[in-house]
Image: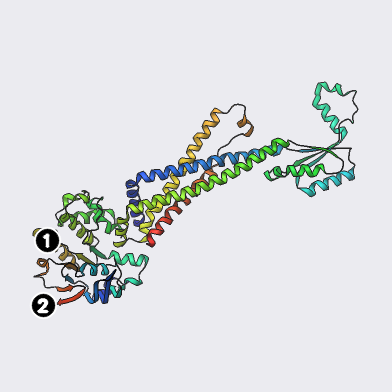
Amino acid sequence: MKDTATISNGTMVELIKVSKTYPPDIIALSNISLSIDVGEMFFVIGKSGAGKTTLLKLISNMEPPNSGLIEVAGHDFRRLRGARLAKLRQRIGVAYQDFKLLLDRTVSENISISMEVSYKQPSQIQKRVRSLLEQLQLSDKHDTITGELSRGEQQRITLARAVANSPALLLVDEPTGNLDAETTTRVMKLLNMANKSGATVVIATHDESIFRHSNRRIMELKRGRILSMQEVTPI
Amino acid sequence: MRFWLAVFRQAGRNLRQTWPSQLMTLLTVSLSVLIFAFFYLVYTNMISSSQKLGDDLRLIIYLEEDPGPEMREQLRRKITNFDEVEDIIFVSRQQAYERFSEQLGPHKDVLDDIPKDFLPASIEIIPLKNLRSLNQIKLFSEYLSSLPGTLKVQYGQEWIERFYYFTKLLSIVVFLSGSLLILTTIFMVSYTIRLTIFGRQAELELLKLVGATNNYIRTPFLIEGVLQGLVGSSLGIFSLFLLYQWIISHFSGPGLLELFSFTFFSAKVIIAIICISIVLCSAGSFTSMQKFLRM
């Protein structure tokens, strides 16, 4: 498997003519071609049903495309199996729109899971969990059962789990949907920090406040097609 | 090392969360092992008793007259042609009289007026000391009766036949209870693991998504299988040992146990039963996990 060094000047995500159709014949994405560079923060916007979540699902290999090629860190998921596939997945952090939290487990256990699978030491895991909870103002929820938290708090836990293992690629689906302005700022700060430390961040959102003033590439989707691509304005 | 720490932590968590179903499986494994081991214990004791029985067992052929040296050789050949035997002893009329006289001890004077050749000559055949020979005895006896000059063939027919049929029945029971052990263990363990998988589908899916290897997902379930096999079979064997102690202490007077000298399993047999249970439980766990990982 190629390491981060070999792709450091290259492309983290590459999609060529990717299409996805759900039965019976709902077109979620059609002919999407896109390249996201290593270390880039990339926004995917569009109304509900535009195909943002499907795009993230395809990039994270949760679902396969019907046609087209998807490469992440130079790897075609279709060619990966077993330990090599697991290794690549460990380098991708995903904050899902439906959270995918284990509601009967504690907050700490939920965040730890992404680090446990890469066999990090328990002391290291605990240190990272506490640090993330502090950054997201959830320090007092360390041992709380996740099902007892509010939607906003659960959303932040999802984000903490996604960034916990310091992934090379971070996919975030509607990160601020249930948050107030102050918490939104904190969440964006955390994502910016991850980006500054080298992670490629892809954010799917319809919250204008988080991308309006950013000097990042923004791709707008409509009914599964690319409506517009706003390039970075040179400062 | 880190891998094993992580999977043992995961296995501990699984056991804590699903302990009621784990306990049910454990009891089923213990009970299956107890049933099988009980019949196997009785069977092995019967087999060892049959060997002891074989030590005393002999067939006696009463002859019409004392055979000469040539006739003795012919008879010896005929006997060994049918089956291998431990020993063949020829007893002449004179020897038979002397033995009888000795057995009478102080009352041997009752034989004074009786002719010294009143007892028939005989051949004593000591068969090989195994159960197969025991099974052959009836056929052997029929064959010996057909030899020329034979008056009668004697052995403990009725008793030996009953013993043989009982041992045969026991071997069938051991076979059936062994099959029951295999089926219940594999099915119970595989269904418990399947139930656990079903109850933790969301977690296992998530583990796959965050990059857990198949080994990371599979190993804690295998550890559960190994533990169920180890603890379940140990409990079963221990229960049987308690039952054995109870039987020994309550039936140690003159009776059946005196006759058979009942003994418990050797350490080798105990380890073998535990190892087989562990393998069966792990196999049950493994098959369920493979089904899930293929999904």
Looking at the rendering, in which quadrant would you find the N terminus of chain B? bottom left
In the image, residue A21 lies at what x, y percent? 27, 71
Q: Quadrant of residue A176?
A: bottom left
Chain for numbered disc 1? A
In the image, residue A129 lies at what x, y percent? 21, 55
Residue type marked 2: Thr
Give the labeled residue for mark 1.
A184
Looking at the rendering, in which quadrant would you find the C terminus of chain B? bottom left
In the image, residue B230 lies at what x, y percent? 45, 46
Give the labeled residue for mark 2.
A233
The Cα atoms of the two marked residues, 2 and 1, are separated by: 24 Å
Q: Is B45 placed left or right of A141 in the picture?
A: right
Q: Quadrant of residue B207?
A: bottom left
Chain for numbered disc 2? A
In the image, residue A231 lies at what x, y percent? 14, 77
* Secondary structure type for disc 2: loop
- Disc 2 vs disc 1: which is toward the camera? 1
Q: Is A186 placed left or right of B250 in the picture?
A: left
Q: Is residue B265 visible?
A: no
- Residue at (63, 43) in percent of width and height: B168
Q: Is residue A205 above or below residue A178?
A: below
- Residue at (39, 49) in percent of width and height: B192
Q: Is residue A217 visible?
A: yes
Residue type marked 1: Thr
